Amino acid sequence: MTDPVVDRLTIALAKVSASSLTSPFDAVVVGGGSAGITAARTLAEAGKHVALLEAGPLSLLTHVQSTDLRFDPGLVRSVQQALSYSPQLSGGGTFGSLIGCLGGRGLFWNGAAPRFSADDFEGWPISIGELNNHYEWAEAEFRVTTEYSAGRLSELLIARLKSAGLDARLGPYAVDCHQTASGWLGGTVGNGLAPLLRTTAVTTSGLISISTRAFARKILLSGDTASGVEAIDLATGAILQINARSVVLAAGAFESTRLALASGLPTPHNLAGRFISDHNFVRAYYPMNPADYLANTPEVSIIWIPADKMRGYQIEIHLPSDNLFLAKENGPWAPDRGPYYAAMVRSFAPIQPRADNFIEALPTDAPGSYRVTISLDADDQALAARQVAALEETRRALGADPAQVQNLPLGASHHESGGLIMGHEPASSVTDLYGRFWSTKRLIVCDSASWPSTSPANPHLTIVAIARRQAIQLASEL
């Protein structure tokens, strides 16, 4: 039995392959998450024909919290787990989890959408000034706002935090707060798939051909130029060729790196796969005084304390707990010191990229077929200790009760980057300022694999902004 939604939005890989053999696509984009969708859409808006390959299925058409699944957190976890997979760690165990579906992690992220600061681009071949227009585009498309949690509760808590010397402010969040009126239905959580469906690139113009369950196993070369990909139809097991004038890697930092490594691309300076990074992730759920909430009216608060050069970490505060989109639909609003109304306080700090933090491809044709080697050095460990102390400082400022602080394992943040880092010259980087491989023409990285470092801030908005920038450049060159 066929699914009319899937049939309408996606095309069988065999058909995409056959079409490309007679008329190559302008670009084949590997990865259907926020970076891949943004790159494909940008190229299509420039009139380019694009094949978008996603190894996972078409599962959801919007963010999971924009559906009524949000009223059953256990069901949300079940959906996410069914789409998740984890690569190996070199010391045993697994590294975090990735989401394999059209829309990727962007259908499950929590919506925090700050920009990086100017200092975060130190050591990059680009500056924040080159991203301002792309940040504005991403914020508009993902409906980034501070209005969602603006109100009495946030004002109260921000005043307490500021009195303690903390630079607290309303957190930018990807939530559509437009008034529901005249055909506009507000309230959705920002993600890459929804704005794609708002365009005609898939449903009308046909400029984007999406294939799901399509695993890219190898980049094809014609001399020193990328000429397409070899992909496996995971539904049939068939190995098929998709010809294109360019190849865009946007499968997520480590998956994009895996594909480059598995393809045997020339890497004169042995940098591919190295200088990976992630976030050290510290979190606690602090019980709040029930009197801080209104007694009979649901409230939410999203507060952001940005990093600076002195601290090197950011802090986010969410109330009530992880329930920003639930509005207590599963029972009466009755604030207490229990877990539902706790302050979820978390901190992110980047692991410094080093040559001895790397990934290596494994000889398996499946998502997650690579091994991750990553560890904390002494400076990383010292910063992690400061993060734990900062959570306690934040708790005291909030007037919350003590609770256990969790120092989560690497990979838990879902914020990995690096592996195909960009730079000023081939001797010290794999790609240039537009994500173009130094060694291979028409091969471009549009996700965080090209980042030489990362920010303490949530990377999602910056992933989208940079994908947009790199795709605009590629469109101009095609």
Image (cartoon, rainbow, N blue to C red):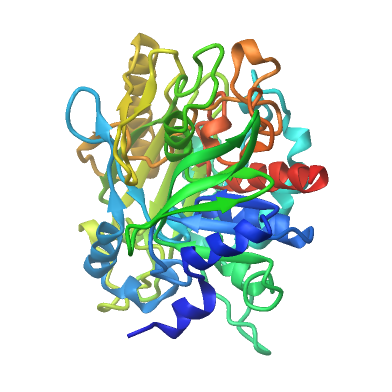
Q: Tell me if 72 is positioned left or right of 297 in this view.
A: left
Query: Who's the residue at 55% across and 39% down the image?
Result: 220
Which corner quadrant holds the N terminus? bottom left
Q: Check the image and name the residue furthest to the left.
A: 92
Q: Check the image and name the residue furthest to the front.
A: 22
Pinpoint residue 249: horizontal percent, then vertical percent: 55, 42
Place residue 151 in its image quadrant: bottom right
Query: Who's the residue at 30% across and 32% down the image?
Result: 362
Pinpoint residue 152: horizontal percent, then vertical percent: 51, 62
Say above or below: 51 vs 203. above
Say above or below: 239 vs 121. below
Q: Camera-side residue: 23 or 393? A: 23
Pinpoint residue 91: horizontal percent, then vertical percent: 20, 22
Q: Check the image and name the residue furthest to the right.
A: 476
Decide if residue 460 is in sight here: yes
Say above or below: 347 vs 204. above
Pinpoint residue 219: horizontal percent, then vertical percent: 52, 39
Place residue 66 in its image quadrant: bottom left
Query: Who's the residue at 52% across and 37% down the image?
Result: 457
Q: Camera-side residue: 176 or 190? A: 190
Query: Who's the residue at 25% across and 57% down the image?
Result: 81
Q: Tell me if 313 is positioned left or right of 245 in this view.
A: left
